[in-house]
Amino acid sequence: MLRGDELREKIFEIISTKWPTYVRGVIEELGWDRENISNVTKVKYHFDQLAREGRIRVKRIDRALVAWPAEIERLRVVHEFVRGL
């Protein structure tokens, strides 16, 4: 079972390839039981850490925490700038 930095990198890899995604979606990709609250807490912790590091952006939509890579947000800003010209 993955732990610590290895788990965080795996979560970031999942977010990068399957964005936008949410905590339970990542849990399913890891092959874990999505109903286990411990798994939800672990993945949410790593979402928070990745957001704090600036590697992902997160937004709460209803009760779901949705995440996407920060790189995508930068591309969106560039797109809006170019479109505005």
Image: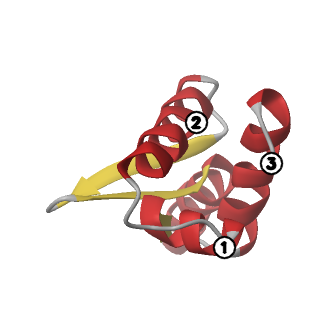
**Is residue 74 positioned above or below 44 on the image?**
below
Residue that carries the numbered disc 2 in the rendered image: 46
Q: Position of residue 13 (x, y in %)?
A: 79, 58
Q: Secondary structure at mark 1?
A: helix
Marked residue nearer the N-terminal end (1 or 3): 3
Q: Are marks 1 and 2 in contact (CB under 8 Å)?
A: no
Residue 18 visible, this orientation:
yes
Q: Which residue is mark 3?
A: 1
Point out the tag, 2 or 3, that comes first from the N-terminus. 3
Q: State whether residue 47 is above or below residue 21.
A: above
What residue appears at the point 18 percent right and 59 percent down from the top-left corner? 63
What residue is drawn where x is 80% and y is 48%?
Answer: 1
Residue under pointer 1: 29
Measure the C-alpha gap from mark 2 to mark 3: 15 Å
Circle 2 packing at 10 Å, graded few (<14), some (14-19), many (20+), is some
Residue lying at 61% horizontally and 34% vertically, measured from the top left: 50
Amino acid type at image mark 1: Glu
Locate residue 78: give its quadrant: bottom right
User: As drawn, which residue projects farthest toward the right?
Assistant: 6
Q: Report helix, strand or loop for mark 3.
A: loop
Q: Nearer the viewer, mark 1 or mark 3?
A: 3
Disc number lying in front (2 or 3)? 3
Mark 1–mark 3 Cα distance, whole angstroms, equals 14 Å
Whether 2 is drawn above or below 45: the answer is below
Measured in 3D between alpha carbons, the distance from the residue under mark 1 to the one under mark 2, in whole angstroms, is 15 Å
Between residues 43 and 74, which one lies in front from this camera angle? Answer: 43
**Amino acid at circle 2:** His
Amino acid type at circle 3 is Met
Q: Is residue 16 left or right of residue 85?
A: right
